[in-house]
Amino acid sequence: MITMEWDGLTDRGQFGGMYLQERDHFADLARDADWNAVFEELGGRPGWANLPRPGIRSGFAPLQAPTTA
């Protein structure tokens, strides 16, 4: 079972430098439609599918993972 993450934080100051850099990179891959790289990243971090770019309040996430009942 894959656990999805959603941190609910919109303040970039709540994150450490390396983690923030990794999350920004992941968001950049999705923004640039580099889907091969997005899915490669998700192979190691499947929970990131629903995480928006830190500090962006739009709530846009790279992917919206389906939920099952």
Image (cartoon, helix red, strand yellow):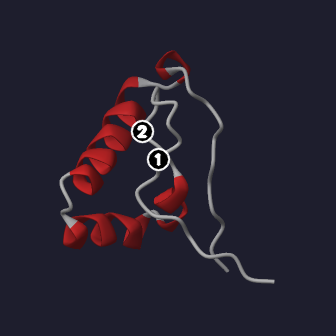
At 21% across and 61% down in the image, what residue appears?
33
Characterize the local packing of mark 2: few (<14), some (14-19) or many (20 or more) Cα atoms within 10 angstroms.
many
Pick the residue in front: 32 or 3: 32
Residue at image coords 69%, 76%: 67
Residue 65 drawn above or below residue 28: below
Residue at mark 1 to residue at mark 2: CA–CA distance: 8 Å
Quarter assignment of residue 24: top left
Residue type indicated by callout 2: Arg
Q: Position of residue 47 (x, y in %)?
A: 55, 62
Q: Identity of the amino acid at label 1? A: Phe
Question: Is residue 66 left or right of 51 when viewed as pictured?
Answer: right
Q: Position of residue 50 (x, y in %)?
A: 53, 56
Q: Are marks 1 and 2 in contact (CB under 8 Å)?
A: yes
Q: Is residue 57 above or below residue 35?
A: above
Task: Point out the frontmost of discs 1 and 2.
Answer: 1
How many numbered marks, from 0 up? 2
Residue wearing tag 1 = 60
Residue that mark 2 sits on: 53
Residue drawn at x 61%, y 76% is 66
Q: Residues within 10 Å of mark 1 (few under 14, many from 20)?
A: few
> On the rendered structure, is 62 left or right of 14?
left
